[in-house]
Amino acid sequence: MPKMKIIHVVHDFLFGGIESYLYYLVQAQSANPNLEVAILCCQEERKVANPRMKTLGVKIYYEAIKPFEWRLSKYRRIQQIVNNYDLAQLHIYKPLLLEALSRSKTPVIFTVHTAGTVRREQSKYAKLKVKFQVSQLNRCCLGVVNNSKYSQDYWLEKGVRKKNNEVIYNGVLFKENFDRSLPFATFPQLKLAKFIVGTSSRFIGWKRVDYLIQAFSKFLEKGGDGTLLLVGDGDERASLENLSAELKISDSVIFAGFQTEVTAYQSVMNVCVFPSVSEPFGLVAIECMHLGKPVLVMRDGGGLQELVEQVEPKFVVENVDALADKLLTLSNANAEDSQVAEQRTTFAEKFNIYQIESSYYSYYQSLHE
C-alpha cells in the first residue's frame, strides 16, 4: 500500500503551543511507516524564529506570504506544492491561502487552534473575521479538527457545519531526561524557597499572568511563604515587573525569561498555575500533570478548565481570591500523596503524542473511505 502523503501548512516556526504541538506531531507521524510528512512554512527560511523544526528530517517548503498577500503567483506556487500530497492540514487562518488551497487538487482539513477570547472578541474586525472564517470552513474544507471539546463547541455555536468535524486533542512528546538542578544553578535563590508557585507562558494579555501575581501577593498577605517563578517572556513583561514592584513582592518573584529547558523549571514547581482566559487547549498543563504537579486554572479557562476538570475539579477556581486561597491550602498541606501524583501522570499519558498520532491517522483514513 502506498504511503499517505500529508503536508502541514503553518505560518512560521515560533515558540508557542501550536509550534510545539506540530513539532511533536511531525516526529510521531514520521515514525508511522504508512505516512510521508512534509511542512509548508509561509515565511522566508532566513526569517524563521525557531529553527528546531529543521532538525526533524522532513521536507520543508518555504513560501513567504505577507499579511495581505495579493500576488496570485504566490498562491499558484503553493497550489503546485500541495498538489503533490494527498491531504493538506492547515494550522493557520489566512483567507486567501485557504481559498487557494481549496482550489488545488488536494483536499484540505483545518486544525482549530483558537476559540476566541473575551478580550479579542471586543473588536468589530474580530467578529467579522470569525463570520468569514466560518463561511470558508464550511465551503473550502473537507474536514475540521478541534483541539478540545471547548474549541469545537465554540465553532459550532459560530456556525461551523462539517460532517468530518472531530475533536483530537493536542499531544505531547514527554521529556523524560532533564536536568532538575538547572533552575537552582541559574537562580540560586530558589534553593531557599519553601514553596515554589510557577507558570510557563507567553506574557501576553489573555494569558493573565497578572492574575497570578495578584493572587501570589494575596497569598503572602495571608501568611504564605514562597517564591513565584515566572518562566517566559512577551510584550507584557515590563508591566508585570511593574505590578510586582507596586505590590511590593519583587523580592519573592523570579522572572526567569525564555528558557529552552522548560521541563526542568516545571519540575521544581510545587504547584503550576495557568490563569489564561478561553485557552483552546493548554499543552503546558498536560506537561506539568505528567510531572505529577497540581495544576490550578480559572473557571473561564476554556480548554484548560476542560482538562483539569477531568482529573482534579477542585483545582478549577473562580477568581484571584480563590486562587490565593488554594495556593495557601496547598502550601500548608503535608507531603502530597504519591498516588495522587501518579494519577495526574496517568491522566497526562492519554495525551502522549503517539496516541494522538494514531487518532489523526484514523481520521485521515476515514476521509479517504
Image: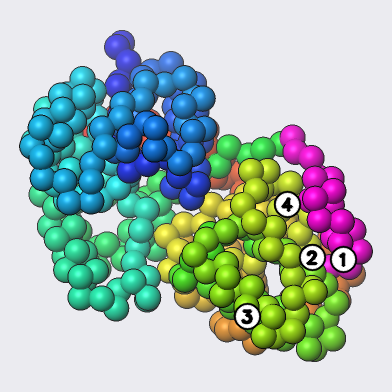
What is the CA distance from the residue labelled 4 to the residue labelled 3? 23 Å
Q: Which residue is mark 4?
A: 265
Tag 1 or tag 4, which sits nearer the N-term? Answer: 1
Give the answer, above or below, for where 28 lies relative to 208: above
> Quarter holding the C terminus?
top left
Q: How many marks?
A: 4
Q: Is residue 228 magenta?
A: no
| SS label for mark 1 | loop
Residue under circle 1? Answer: 193
Q: Give, as a three-letter code, the residue at label 4.
A: Tyr
Badge 3 marks a residue whose secondary structure is: helix
Q: Residues within 10 Å of mark 2 (few under 14, many from 20)?
A: many
Magenta segment: does it hold 188? yes
Give how far apart the Cα atoms at labels 2 and 1 are: 6 Å
N-terminal label among 1 and 3: 1
Stretch of the chain drawn in magenta: 177-195
Answer with mark 4 or mark 3, whichever residue precedes in sequence: 3
The residue labelled by disc 2 is 196
Q: Residue furthest top?
A: 1
User: What residue appears at the point 36 percent right and 25 percent down from the top-left corner?
Assistant: 60
Identify the residue at image location x=20%, y=70%: 125
Amino acid tagged 3 = Leu
